[in-house]
Amino acid sequence: MNLHRMLRAREAAGKPIRVGVIGAGKFGSMFLAASQRTPGMHIMGIADLALPRARAALARVGWPEASYAAPSLDAAHRGRATALTEDAMALIADPRIEVIVECTGHPAAGIAHAQAAIAHGKHVVMVNVEADVLAGPLLAEQARVAGVVYSMAYGDQPALVCEIVDTLRAEGFTVVAAGKGTKYLPAYHASTPATVWGHYGLTEEQARLGGMNPQMFNSFLDGTKSGIEMAAIANATGLQPPEDGLAFPPCGTQDLPRVFAGSTGRVEVISSLERDGRQVVNDLRWGVYAVFEGETDYIRRCFSEYGVATDPSGRYAALWRPYHFIGLELGLSVASAALRQEPTGCSEAWRGDVAATAKRDLRPGEVLDGEGGGMVWGKCIPAERSMALGALPIGLAHGVTLTRAVPAGSIVGYADVVLDEASPAVRARRAMEAAARPAKAAE
């Protein structure tokens, strides 16, 4: 509860946290909008492969043009301004930058940037949940050895769930389930970028005018993004993914304790739609939750006395947050990493994975189009099951060629595709899998 005080102290001392941001998309733009108003924080550089897009984003969020016109990082440092660059590795290498915020959303790029930042002694705030789920436990261990922080992004739902879970556990409660809400129907698993806007009630023209990326929005709809986020929470908290994927039960906030009564520690996403398409009463579409247990008569009596939402038995209670502010809240992760040397959520072990699952019958010779595409969606399953199946992670399911047919609904395996084993992302993933095998064998 002291981050603002600590930030003001850094400001007063003339030593703001110097930050490098990689990727000026939606999440990055929201952070940039908020950071302009945060004392003790200096966005020294922004790396993006499309500088006109980055300039347009900064103008859109209200940055004065002069503030991001520094011709170099040296000039940005001297003038408390911001330099734009296409060279993310140069930004990472600058010794004056303390924290790297990775916002690309590209798994391979995220892993490469995180490993480079860790090697240069930088703290890493990993907005890129795709990269975190593909190799987060490996990156977290590399950061620990290097003495830097590797952190989830506060404002994104996984970090907020981790906060609620940690708070409840620190208070002595047993958490039986945690997760988030979303809009879900079973048919959405087959959604493609060509069909996605109908599910959102938009026309293609409306989506185009809004600058909406159909593949990204389809990832949220088809269950992939939910699977990625739940796997990240599992890896950070020890809560377990369901054996055969998320169930997405329809559930309002008033029913959380009843729906999850008797659970023994799982991640789950609740749907804001009934299976017939009706809106759930008191839905949690934009929010996060945790269900916990009152393990004594006295605690359950306290629940009753203070109006805590419980199941009919009074034993299980729920805590939730109705919405999240996305990148507008990211500064808490930056401040926590730099000032407290503490992450706002971090993978501690590999427990959850997201397996590429066929949306339709797939044929040999086809090239997978990855997360949010028309061919596969990501199913959240236990890491142990993923290893046993040899499942292809969704983070590696882009641009790879199928060598044999995969029926609709089946998990795609490593054996079904041709992978570039020399690529950094594949090498990182293989290293994480190799490290997990002795641990599983020891259990």
Image: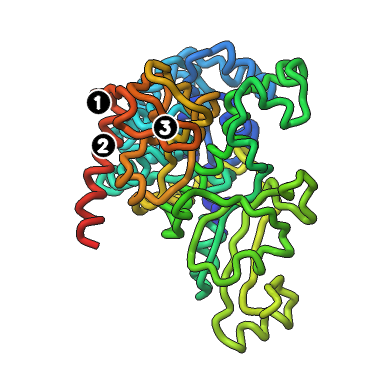
The image shows residue 238 at horizontal and vertical percentages of: 42, 59
Q: Earlier in the sequence, mark 1 or mark 2?
A: 1
The image shows residue 79 at horizontal and vertical percentages of: 52, 23
Q: Nearer the viewer, residue 423 or 244?
A: 244
Residue placed under numbered mark 2 in the picture: 430
Residue depicted at 50% across the width and 25% down the height: 375
Amino acid type assigned to the residue bearing label 3 in the image: Gly
Q: Quadrant of residue 259?
A: bottom right
- 231 lies above or below 206: below
Q: Give the number of the disc on residue 395.
A: 3
- 233 lies above or below 396: below
Q: Is residue 26 visible?
A: no
Tell me how the rendering is colored.
rainbow
Q: Earlier in the sequence, mark 3 or mark 2?
A: 3
The image shows residue 122 at horizontal and vertical percentages of: 36, 37
* Left or right: where 251 falls relative to 428: right
Residue placed under numbered mark 1 in the picture: 421
Q: Do the residues under discs 1 and 2 have CB atoms within 8 angstroms?
A: yes
